Image: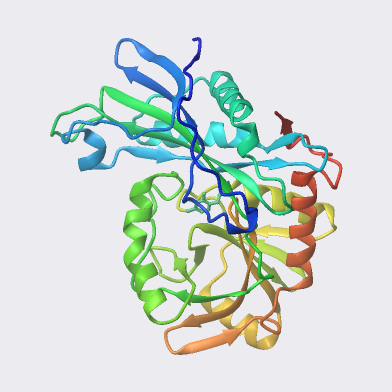
Amino acid sequence: MDIEIQPVTQPKPRIEDESKLVFGRQFTDRMFVMEYDAGRGWHSARIQPYAPFTLDPAALVFHYAQEIFEGLKAFRRQDGSIALFRPKDNIRRFNQSASRLCMPPVDEEFFFEAIRKLIRLEADWVPHSEGTSLYIRPTMIATEAVLGVKPSEKYLCYIILCPVGAYYKGGFKPVRIWISDQFVRSAPGGTGEVKCGGNYAASLLAAKEAATKGFDQVLWLDAVERRYVEEVGSMNICFLYDGKIVTSPLHGTILNGVTRRSILQLGAEMGYTVEERAMSVDELLDGAESGRLAEAFGTGTAAVVSPVGQLTYRDRTVTIGDGQMGPLTMKLYKALTGIQYGHEPDTHNWIEML
Ligand SMILES: *Cc1c(COP(=O)(O)O)cnc(C)c1O
């Protein structure tokens, strides 16, 4: 399938001061779009000016939430070149999400080329300062206009881009976490490992309650026993416990993060034992008090790593280590961002140059 390139007639105003870039608020001039019809497959692939869609109010996405997305980044290097971090992992996961929600897969090679073509056209939107990046958001929505719970026969797949500022502008600020014993994010057999908007809609109330109580994020426990740690906010979570890196196993209720996978590999190469095992909330809180739990951090594309300073469960609050970002968290952050920005060699073939 060819990609039609449409001209941009009205370029958007730019934010020249890269320190003023706010995540997810400004988008580039162009977007990639393609359409799907049952019987015809994907068609009408194009890179067009960024613009609103016109959709029928009955479009299935509005009623039954048949929607998936991805999130990955492109990084500007000192020599001006642009690097993508493990984009094929994101595209593969996009198709896995699609399959779970009865949506059509994209051709992975074609989609990778679509991302590259789009970013090549938008290359001057990739910011230059250290720590900045271009965030890439592939999305698929069900567009058939019919009220009826069934897989749509029509879809829209698109990719939008936003330049983002450095996540840790003001230094690393460890987050305060509220462990929810009331709400769960996902249950066995559900959509916890699918990157879909529906999971996020269901998480908002817990996040709002946590914010009201003065916390930054929610830590989710498993739905069955309400005992085992799953994820934190929209990140996977890792612990340094008894000198080992411990994280929740991939058993269908947590997202299979690209950052999680990369951090575990880097940790193992640094000589740490990596354990993918269930960690109970008691083990976690007792560990923080006894010192067996030395560090905790979330992992995800947006922040890379996000150090956890404090945990609260019911009426018990514990501080992890000295409440600051731990040395392993820092070392992993430097190792991963070093590969992304090209300060360190890419020995794992994680980088795809534009
Ligand atoms: C996207 C996401 C993550 C992190 O995945 P990365 O591939 O590392 O960005 C973790 N948890 C949830 C719920 C997510 O949606």
The front one of 346 and 320 is: 346
| Residue depicted at 57% across the width and 86% down the height | 318
Q: Quadrant of residue 238?
A: bottom right
Q: Is residue 245 above or below residue 289?
A: above
Can residue 123 be seen from the camera position used here?
yes
Residue 261 in percent (x, y) is at: 66, 48
Left or right placement of residue 16 versus residue 269 in this view: left
Quadrant of the image containing the C terminus:
top right
Residue 95 in percent (x, y) is at: 48, 30
Q: Is residue 301 above or below residue 275?
A: above
Left or right placement of residue 288 versus residue 81 in this view: left
| Residue depicted at 58% across the width and 58% down the height | 20
| Residue depicted at 45% across the width and 30% down the height | 10
| Residue depicted at 61% across the width and 54% down the height | 165
Left or right placement of residue 137 versus residue 154 in this view: right
The front one of 93 and 40 is: 40
Residue 80 in percent (x, y) is at: 78, 37
Can residue 273 be seen from the camera position used here?
no
Residue 63 in percent (x, y) is at: 20, 42
Q: Is residue 39 above or below residue 74?
A: above
Q: Is residue 27 above or below residue 233?
A: above
